Amino acid sequence: MLSQTHGCAARPHYGFTLIELLVVISIVASLIVLLLPSLTLARDNVRAVVCASHHRQWALAFHAYTFDNTGALPWFAAEFPCCGGSFWIDATAPYIGLDEPDASAAKVRSCPTGEAFVGVNYGGFNSTSPPIAPINYETDRRSGHTYPPLKFEQIRQPSSWLMLFDTSDSYMYSPNGWTMTEDTDGDGIPDSHSVILATQFPYNGAKPRVHHDAINVASCDGHVERMPYKVFLDIDNGYWRDD
């Protein structure tokens, strides 16, 4: 009788060697390095779009306010020094459904970058023709003088006169009245008024480089666009005067 032996064939072993694993890790790391700038840019573009949507909502609120107030734009504040009476945020917030105690801190007013807020083009008092900016004070408590409201029908170029944009807080001193004389970022472009820079913030309160050297703006007609900071800071570009 023949005896039979039962043997098992050796099974092949599958897996990565240490060198192969290191190669895979290095390839994945290289892909991450290559893709990270694109992912960052995509994330920042999304933030800029959300920010622009916030500007659009406030621009619509401004227009709704004018409809209810015989065509008059909202005041920056009812009284100078700021802000006796109704501040512009308080006056327009109900038109976008805000009933918070402090509408200025509402999410819809902040930029998703965490570096800016929707603010206004501020011009002091409506005492020149044409006015320095569309958003002004109503009453100067120092003199007791009350100024007439600026009405939408008086604006000659609503599609190009800037009304809202990204700011450090809630407003920018219009360079139409506070001329840029100082270059704070060293790029050769004057970007700040000397007095304001000495007491408050650069760019007269705007944040013109918050979106990859661009800023979201809303004109008086309500349309929103992203504007390169060099255009935004150019006092002669046609956006600062209602010509």
Image: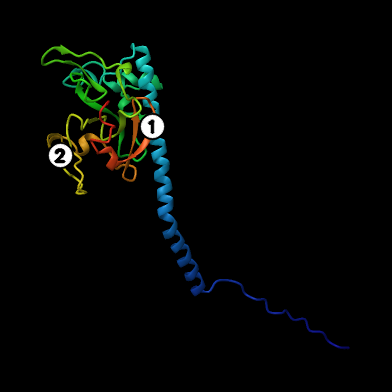
* Residue at image location 35% in from the left, 41% down from the top: 113
Where in the figure is residue 236, as x and y percent of width and height?
24, 35
Which quadrant of the rendered structure holds the C terminus?
A: top left
Circles 2 and 1, Cβ within 8 Å, touching? The answer is no
Mark 2 or mark 1: name the one nearer the start of the chain. Answer: 2
Give the quadrant of residue 49: top left
Position of residue 140 measured from the top left corner of the image (x, y, whole percent): 15, 16
Q: At 47% across and 70% down in the image, what residue appears? A: 22
Question: 128 or 68, which is in the foreground?
Answer: 128
Look at the picture and state if 24 lies above or below 118. Answer: below
- Residue 151 visible in the picture: yes
Instruction: Decide which of 47, 21 is in the foreground and name it.
Output: 47
Instruction: Give the answer, above or below, for where 217 lies relative to 27.
Output: above
Secondary structure state at the residue bearing disc 1: strand
Residue at mark 2 to residue at mark 1: CA–CA distance: 28 Å
**Residue holding disc 2:** 181
Q: Amino acid at mark 2?
A: Thr
Instruction: Give the tally of numbered discs.
Output: 2
* Image quarter in which the N terminus is found: bottom right
Callout 1 amino acid: Val
Q: Which residue is mark 1?
A: 224
Up-down relation of residue 189 to residue 128 (above or below):
below
Q: Is 35 drawn above or below residue 175 in the view shown? A: below
Give the farthest residue toward the front.
Answer: 243
| Left or right: residue 64 compared with residue 199 | right
